[in-house]
Image (tube, rainbow, N blue to C red):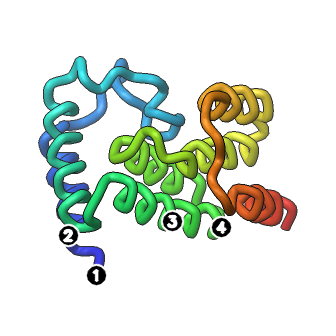
Amino acid sequence: MRVPLAAALVAAALVAGAARADGPDDLLPMYGNFDRTLDLGLAAADKVFVAVIVARYGGRREGSRAIAADAWRLLRGNDAANAMRLFNEAWIVDPHYYDVYWGFGAILLAQGQVEDAIVGSSARTASRTCPPGTARRSSAISRTFTR
């Protein structure tokens, strides 16, 4: 049932208000590196959003994992714009979850931004070890974009 998540998204959007030209861009990884803490409305919306997701899924990692799974489904369905929006939301919930960065990279790669996909991904994961199953994710990414 997706109603609680949808309600959280609507609440976050209402609190945050409309995006400004100098604000975050939800079609770029990590909202285009916009510092969301500088906008009190966005910071409050993010706090509410994370609280709702944690309450629903039992933790930040679990919530981020669920949102990222939906993003991957959208990406496989050729909806990169909405997949990026969901990967950004998953990043808000758990900025340390590796799969979010794989998603950012996959979308950038599909857009032909190969250098950004590689540099951004390797810079974020250089100090981390990837968990088991990462090779399967890499294989899934390559299958997604070779069809």
Query: In this image, 116 relative to 95: left or right?
Result: right
- State if disc 1 and disc 2 touch (CB < 8 Å): yes
Q: What residue type is labelled 4?
A: Arg
Q: Which mark sits nearer the N-terminus, 3 or 4?
A: 3
Instruction: Give the crowd class for mark 4: few <14, some 14-19, many >=20 residues within 10 Å.
Output: some
Residue 76 shows which numbered tag?
4
Q: Nearer the viewer, residue 108 or 140?
A: 140
Query: In this image, 144 relative to 43: left or right?
Result: right
- State if disc 2 and disc 4 touch (CB < 8 Å): no
The Cα–Cα distance between marks 2 and 3, rounded to whole angstroms, is 17 Å
The Cα–Cα distance between marks 4 and 2, rounded to whole angstroms, is 24 Å
**Secondary element at tag 1:** loop
Residue 1 shows which numbered tag?
1
Residue 47, percent from left and from top: 18, 41
The Cα–Cα distance between marks 3 and 4, rounded to whole angstroms, is 11 Å
Residue 71, percent from left and from top: 51, 60
The Cα–Cα distance between marks 2 and 1, rounded to whole angstroms, is 8 Å
* Circle 3 residue: 69
Q: What residue type is labelled 2?
A: Pro
* Circle 2 residue: 4
Q: Which mark sits nearer the N-terminus, 1 or 3?
A: 1
Instruction: Give the crowd class for mark 2: few <14, some 14-19, many >=20 residues within 10 Å.
Output: few
Q: Which mark sits nearer the N-terminus, 2 or 3?
A: 2
Q: Which amino acid does label 3 sit on?
A: Ala
Q: Residue furthest bottom?
A: 1
Instruction: Give the crowd class for mark 3: few <14, some 14-19, many >=20 residues within 10 Å.
Output: some
Instruction: Give the crowd class for mark 1: few <14, some 14-19, many >=20 residues within 10 Å.
Output: few
Q: What residue type is labelled 1?
A: Met
